[in-house]
Every structure is written in C-alpha cells, then in structure tokens.
Image: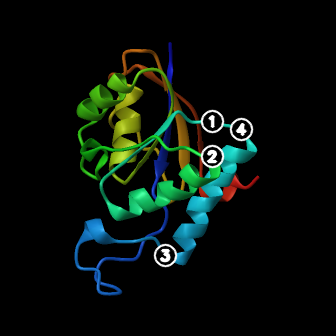
Amino acid sequence: MTLEIYVIRHADAVPQGEQGIVHDEDRPLTDVGRAQAQQVANFFLKRSLGLDRVVVSPLVRSRQSAEPILQTLGISDVVTCEHASPNGEPKRLAKFLKKLGSGRVALVSHLPFVAVFSGWLMGNKRAQLDFQKGAVALISTGPDVDKATGTLQWLLQPEFLGS
C-alpha cells in the first residue's frame, strides 16, 4: 500500500502588518492568493486527481488555500494538524500521516516546512526544493511514512498548473 502526498505550499497571503493583521497565523489570502488556490483545485479536477483527505496547518492562509480544493472536489475529510505548521517537525507529521493510512492526501502547509518535510521524506533534509506560493509536489511513500521512504514524482510551480 502506498501513500501519495500532494505537498502544497499555501497561496499568496496578506503580509503581516498590513490590513491590521498583527499575528502571522491570522494572515488571510490576497485576491491573487484566492486565484492561486482555485488554480490548484482546478488542476486536481482537470487531471482527475482524487483525494481521500486534506491536511492543513492551523494557520488561516493554509485553511483558505485548501477551501477551493475541498469545494471543487467535493471533499469533506479535512484535518487540521499542528505538525504542518511553518516550523513543524517532519517525524511528527509523518507519524500523523501514517495513522491516516494509505491513499491520496493533500498537505497544505508553509515554507520552510514544505521544503524541509519533502527533503526529509526523500532522505535528504538539505534538499532545496523550490516551492513558490501555490506550488504542488507529489511524493509517494510506502506504508511506513518515514525518513528516506519517499520518492518525488513531480513538482509544479503555479505557472505550470494551468497547462
């Protein structure tokens, strides 16, 4: 059994300090960000990439980036996981994902964590994957979601999601 993890960096968000946003975790998506999030959802729909569940960090911009995916694909299984936060720990998130079982999972998170977690899964925590806002990577693992068990299938930046 395999687990396909679609690692997604959240879409463009309002900078901290603008629009009265004081705390980083409260930053909502911008208009550009909402369009990026919808583009990700359309990408999944157009390619018939069904998902079993969506995992998000507790931060507003992560949840908002996932909403179009949930609505467009008709997914109700969304889970908030503190281990998917910007400074999360890969091993803890891996344990969490392992408990979910096999299938297809979208993980909506943040830099630096999306790059760190992806590199850790592939066995090189120093791997420098470039996740622009709204980028999507597919990493497949076996049933033991752990360090060096993942294989990067692809990484697409936002400008290639509409192709």
**Where residue 94 sits: x, y (%)?**
32, 29
Would residue 124 be seen by someone viewing this image from the given angle?
no
Residue designated by label 2: 73
Whether tag 2 and tag 1 are in contact, CB under 8 A, the answer is yes
Task: Choose between 137 and 19: the one closer to the eye.
Answer: 19
Q: Residues within 10 Å of mark 3 (few under 14, many from 20)?
A: some
Where 154 sits versus 87, above or below? above
Q: Residue at x 66, y 37 (%)?
A: 49
Look at mark 1 in the image and give the residue it sits on. Answer: 50
Residue 27, x across and y down, in percent: 34, 71
The tally of labels here is 4
Q: Residues within 10 Å of mark 4 (few under 14, many from 20)?
A: few
Three-letter amino acid code at disc 2? Leu
User: Which residue in the structure is indicated by mark 4?
Assistant: 48
Measured in 3D between alpha carbons, the distance from the residue under mark 4 to the one under mark 3, in whole angstroms, is: 27 Å
Of callouts 2 and 3, the N-terminal one: 3
Residue at screen point 38% across, 28% down: 121
Circle 1/circle 4 CB separation < 8 Å: yes
**Mark 1: secondary structure:** loop
Say if residue 142 shows up in the picture: yes
Q: Quadrant of residue 95?
A: top left
Q: Amino acid at mark 4?
A: Ser
Nearest the camera: 47 or 90?
A: 47
